[in-house]
Image (tube, helix red, strand yellow):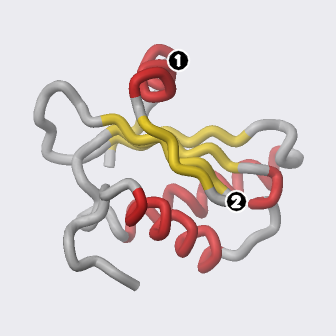
Amino acid sequence: METLKKTAEFAEVYEKGKAYGSKLLVLYVLNPEKDREEGRLGISVSKKVGNSVVRHRLRRLIKESFRLQKSKWAARDYVVVARKEAAGKSYAEIEETLFCLGNRSNSLAKGENR
């Protein structure tokens, strides 16, 4: 899965995309104008969540969750925003939350249930 890097790419997903929230994460989803083979992922973790160790750990957990399940996700643009409550959560909790948000946003392949 490619990554979103530029501020303009993030802004486009925030403005034109649809948001799905949970206690731990917020998932923004945007259908691209042109067809792509795979989706793009952007991760945002604010300094309010914790120090750099905590923020980078969350970023790694989210990225790994997408990487392991990338065949199940539709080819769209995604931005995941971590909330304060996500600090200190396990990989399983982060993955479960992403999976639930993916189901709510219809971004997962049909028949992919936990």
Please name the residue shown 63% across and 38% down the image. 44
**Along the horizontal axis of the image, is 36 left or right of 28?**
left
Outermost residue, top side? 8
Please name the residue shown 34% across and 81% down the image. 113
Outermost residue, bottom side? 114
Residue 81's place in the image compared with 106, above or below, is above
Amino acid, disc 2: Leu
**Where residue 102 sits: x, y (%)?**
41, 61
**Along the horizontal axis of the image, is 78 left or right of 107?**
right
Mark 2 or mark 1, whichever is nearer to me: 2
Residue 73's place in the image compared with 100, above or below, is above
Q: Nearer the viewer, residue 24 or 65?
A: 24
Residue beneath disc 1: 7
Quarter occupied by the C terminus = bottom left
Residue 98's place in the image compared with 4, above or below, is below
Q: Nearer the viewer, residue 19 or 33?
A: 19
**Along the horizontal axis of the image, is 91 left or right of 95?**
right
Kindly report the distance in space between the C-alpha atoms of the residues bearing marks 2 and 1.
Answer: 23 Å
Please name the residue shown 14% across and 45% down the image. 37
For marks 2 and 1, the one nearer the N-term is 1
Q: Secondary structure at mark 2?
A: loop
**Where residue 98 sits: x, y (%)?**
51, 63
Residue beneath disc 2: 24
**Residue 90 found in image quarter:** bottom right
